[in-house]
Amino acid sequence: MNSHEPTDGLDTPALVTAGLVAAIGTFAMIVALQVLYLNFQAAEQKESGTSTAASSASLMAEQRSKINSYGWLDRQNDVVAIPIDLAIELTARELAGETEADEKADTEVRREPSS
């Protein structure tokens, strides 16, 4: 009696080996592409003279300046920008139902010098 079972003509060890080689090759290709991308990105940042952290910091400073200052948004339509803290306070008062007279009185009290 033959100890070998009938096969369908496939060389299983060769298929497993080919699969492992393909998986390892794919992984190596992914790592190589990541290295190339990161090197390219670093070169671009070096060339432009800015880093992500520096550009983020300057953007945040610019945004803080905009939200904490007065300015004209549209002079023709008399639309102005006010600091965000004041806008929040005014909106809260408006939603709380305070009248314009109350707001005027509060504003006048703030302008009086303290003794």
Image (tube, rainbow, N blue to C red):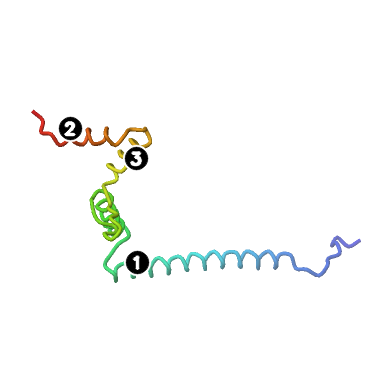
Quick check: marks 1 and 3 in contact, CB under 8 Å?
A: no
Q: How busy is the neighbourhood of tag 2: few (under 14 within 10 Å), some, or many (20 plus)?
A: few
Q: Which residue is drawn at 23% across and 36% down?
A: 104
In the rendered structure, which disc, 2 or 1, sits on the residue that comes first in sequence?
Answer: 1
- At x 43% / y 66%, what residue is drawn? 35
Residue 73 vertical position relative to residue 113 in the rendered view, above or below: below
Quadrant the N terminus occupies: bottom right
Point out residue 44 in the picture as x, y percentages from the top left corner: 34, 70
Compared across the picture, whether 95 is left or right of 50 comes to right
Q: Quadrant of residue 102?
A: top left
The residue under label 2 is 109
Q: Name the residue under label 1.
A: 42
Q: Position of residue 7 (x, y in %)?
A: 83, 65
Residue at (24%, 52%) from the top-left corner?
65
Type of amino acid under label 2: Val
Any mark on residue 91, and which?
Answer: 3
Residue 56 image position (x, y, % from top left)? 31, 56
Indicate whether 50 appears above or below 112: below
SS assignment at label 1? helix
Q: Which mark is residue 1?
A: none
